Amino acid sequence: MVVAAVPWARGGARFTRLFEDQCAWLAAHAPASVVAELLWITWRTVTAIVTRVVADARGSRDLFDGLVRI
């Protein structure tokens, strides 16, 4: 088995970034069981994808950027 980093997938993912982003968006608007049935994946896979997408989004931006005062 050969493992290589590619620009269209996140590390440890079996799906493309576009598919994972779509899955995460759907999961924000519908139950995981509905998303799983629609995309033909398991609800555990939906949960893993959402976890990966959120971790990727958190790492790419600073939540305190532009904060002036608390």
Image: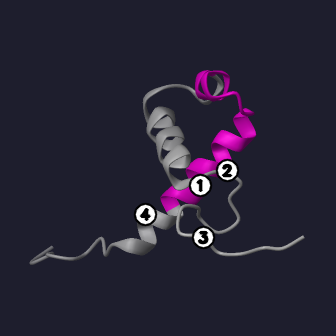
Q: Is residue 41 magenta?
A: yes
- In the depicted structure, whether residue 28 falls above or below residue 48: above
The reply to whether the C-beta atoms of the residues labelled 1 and 2 are less than 8 Å apart is: yes
Label 1 belongs to which residue? 51
For the residues marked 4 and 2, what is the alpha-carbon distance in whole angstroms? 14 Å
What amino acid type should be assigned to the residue bearing mark 1?
Answer: Thr
CA separation in Å, label 1 and label 4: 10 Å
Q: Give the distance between the C-alpha atoms of the residues marked 1 and 3, in whole angstroms.
A: 20 Å
What secondary structure is marked by label 2?
A: helix
Tell which circle, 4 or 2, labels the residue nearer the N-terminal end. Answer: 2
Category of crowding for the residue at label 2, using alpha-carbon neighbours closer than 10 angstroms: few (below 14), some (14–19), many (at least 20): some
Is 68 situated left or right of 11 in this image? left
Q: Earlier in the sequence, mark 1 or mark 4?
A: 1
Query: In the rendered structure, which amino acid carries the disc numbered 4?
Result: Ala
Q: Secondary structure at mark 4?
A: helix
The residue where tag 2 is placed is 48
Q: What is the spatial separation of the Cα atoms under label 1 and label 2, in whole angstroms?
A: 5 Å
- Tell me if label 1 and label 4 are in contact, CB under 8 Å: no
Tally the marks: 4
Q: Earlier in the sequence, mark 1 or mark 3?
A: 3
Q: Residue at x 62, y 29 (%)?
A: 39
Label 3 CA crowd tier, 10 Å (few <14, some 14–19, many 20+): few
Query: Magenta span covers which residues?
Result: 34-54
Q: Quadrant of the N terminus?
A: bottom right
- Quick one: 10 or 56, which is closer to the camera? 10
Q: Position of residue 60 (x, y in %)?
A: 39, 73
Residue type (three-letter) at the residue carrying disc 2: Ala
Residue that numbered label 3 is attached to: 6
Amino acid under label 3?
A: Val
